[in-house]
């Protein structure tokens, strides 16, 4: 693009290292128009005597760091082969944990939990009783239906029992800081391993997160950053 006082080349709008060959012409045209529009407006503003220095500073503070991170991400994740090698070294990224559809009733005393468990053993529904007696607000309002819960996301005392519980079986009484629990597994979706193709984005993000920590630490060391955590003033005011 050429004009009076205006020249924009291919290298101004396209990273030639990323695109050694011409990418989509429409994409190039879009970038060209954006750059041309920016230069024309900047030139007009300068002729009108408008001070755009604060805009330039905002661009430097906001856009340039983003451009740097984009470039670093390309260094950290250069190609799919590197991603596959990382996935091979970190197979847990493909692990999908078991999910369980849980029913739960919570009481404030062991005696009440024992009495209700006996009623369930005699044929009454845990879910109906949870709607009447559970002290857990969510569970009571949903008649004990806690929905689908990921393995490992509950309290340790309950997770330990769920690991041994069969579908449809009512657990023994479980004591936690929140009360006395009776739980059951309505159904479950077993854990599985997803292939690389199904977790490519997850692998990429894991690689970037790992490298980002080192990169930020390197910058902090280079610029001798020292963190000062301020104590909250007395009285709870911030």
Image (tube, rainbow, N blue to C red):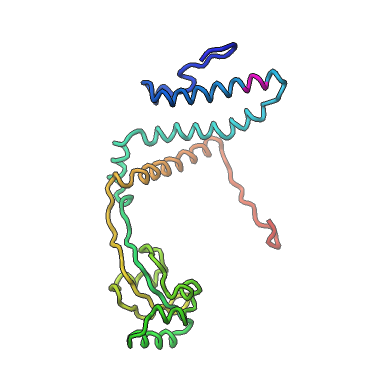
Above or below residue 154? Residue 88 is: above
What's the residue at 38%, 65% (across, down)? 148
Instruction: Pick out the residue farthest to the top.
Output: 4
What span is colored magenta in the figure? 41-45
Above or below residue 215? Residue 116 is: below
Q: Is residue 209 magenta?
A: no
> Viewed as shown, does residue 235 lie left or right of 78?
right
Does the magenta stretch mainly form a helix, a strand or a loop?
helix
- The image quadrant of residue 77 is top left
Q: Quadrant of the C terminus?
A: bottom right
- The image quadrant of residue 163 is bottom left
Percent from the top left, x then y, of residue 180?
44, 79
What's the residue at 27%, 45% (across, down)? 88
- The image quadrant of residue 63 is top right
What's the residue at 53%, 34% (across, down)? 65
Percent from the top left, x then y, of residue 84?
29, 41
Query: Is 193 in front, or is 27?
Result: 27
Instruction: Pick out the residue farthest to the right.
Output: 49
Query: Is 39 in front, or is 190?
Result: 39
> Viewed as shown, does residue 40 lie left or right of 116?
right
């Amino acid at each position: 693009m050429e004009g009076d006082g205006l020249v924009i080349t291919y290298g101004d709008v396209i990273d030639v290292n990323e695109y050694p060959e011409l990418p989509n012409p429409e994409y190039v045209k879009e970038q060209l128009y954006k750059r041309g529009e920016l230069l024309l407006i900047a030139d007009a503003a300068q002729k009108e005597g408008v001070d755009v220095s604060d805009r330039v500073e905002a661009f430097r503070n906001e856009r340039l760091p983003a451009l740097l991170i984009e470039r670093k991400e390309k260094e950290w994740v250069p190609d799919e082969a590197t991603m596959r090698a990382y996935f091979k070294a970190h197979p847990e990224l493909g692990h999908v944990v078991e999910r369980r559809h849980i029913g739960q009733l919570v009481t404030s005393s062991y005696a009440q939990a024992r009495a209700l468990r006996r009623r369930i053993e005699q044929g009454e529904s845990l879910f109906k009783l949870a709607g009447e007696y559970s002290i857990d607000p969510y569970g009571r309002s949903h008649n004990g239906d806690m929905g689908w819960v990921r393995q490992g996301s509950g309290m340790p005392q309950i997770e330990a029992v769920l690991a041994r519980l069969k579908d449809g079986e009512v657990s023994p009484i479980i004591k936690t800081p929140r009360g006395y629990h009776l739980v059951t597994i309505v159904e479950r979706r077993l854990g599985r391993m997803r292939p690389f193709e199904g977790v490519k984005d997850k692998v990429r993000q894991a690689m970037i997160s790992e490298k980002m920590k080192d990169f930020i630490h390197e910058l902090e060391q280079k610029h001798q950053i020292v963190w000062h955590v301020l104590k909250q003033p007395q009285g709870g005011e911030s």
